[in-house]
Image (spheres, helix red, strand yellow):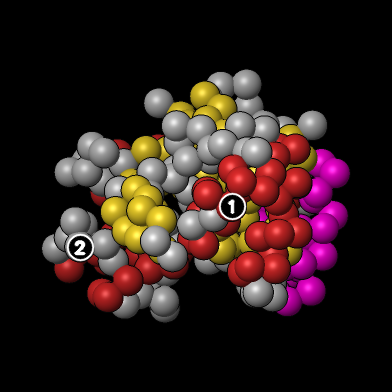
Amino acid sequence: MYFTAGYYLVIPKHERGTVNGYTFISRVWSVSTYISYVYPSNWGFSWEYSKRQVPKNFSLAESELTKLHACINALFEQSKYGAPGFFFEQKDALAFQEQFLSDLPQVRLLGIFLHESHCSTANAEVEPHTSPDWPTLATLLQQRVPEPEAGLTIGFDLLGLFDYGGYEPFSYHVLEEEYHTLFSIELNEYGLFPGEADCQRVASYTDTIADEPATWLPFKVKLFT
């Protein structure tokens, strides 16, 4: 069984680049701010807000920004919005989108879900480093909210989970060529892994390349329309 690990409002970044002679176009539907524009991410918290963190395609009048922060702060106090920036429930993400993102029709709602066999590992990574009254991924996973039947499964994202609850995605390291050559794994049209087993096969290799204090876990990704 898969349990809910958060809902994110995102716009994937479609950027062309070259790494070690390999040209790529980022088309990854990831919930990580390394890859996607995430609304509102941690800048939704009034105490974390910095104009430099806000995507350039998003602007609000000061009065609307105040309302946005009040909305997120209220959800946070109700344990419905977690640090470093995700919704616990689909309905709250949709309400936020309707109220504040009407000028960005390209925003999409993604949900990520973690298999029950990995939940204790994720909790152990995050829970000891956060306050009990500070909602995080561990808070949501401990509620054991089943994955909804709705939504289109678009693949699996291998995410490096940090102790503060944030993620570094596999796609940040542009390893498509290595995955194909060493593991015979091709990413799908969304730039994600076709199955959870594919993530697990490359997790150790990705960890070595990334060289970060992160725990790499496979998350199912669903697109909601």
> Helix, strand, or loop for circle 1?
helix
Q: Is residue 136 left or right of residue 67?
A: right
Residue depicted at 79% across the width and 31% down the height? 1
> Label 1 crowding class (10 Å Cα cut-off): few <14, some 14-19, many 20+?
some
Residue 47 rendering spot, x and y as whole percentages? 42, 78
Residue at numbered disc 2: 56
Name above or below for residue 62 compared with residue 198.
below
Q: Does 171 lie within the magenta span?
A: no
Magenta portion: prevailing SS class: helix
Residue depicted at 41% across the width and 56% down the height? 22
In the rendered structure, find residue 178 and report the number of the disc placed on it.
Answer: 1
The residue lying toward the viewer, choosing from 30 and 3, is 30
Question: Quadrant of residue 50 in the image?
Answer: bottom left
Residue 205 rendering spot, x and y as whole percentages? 71, 59
Counting every numbered tag in the picture gives: 2
Q: In this view, does 56 lie to the left or right of 109?
A: left
Q: Distance between the residues labelled 2 and 1?
A: 33 Å
Q: What stretch is highlighted in magenta?
A: 116-140
Q: Is residue 133 left or right of residue 91?
A: right
Q: Which of marks 2 and 1 is in front?
A: 1
Name above or below for residue 144 compared with residue 205.
above
Quadrant where the C terminus lies?
top left
> Helix, strand, or loop for circle 2?
loop
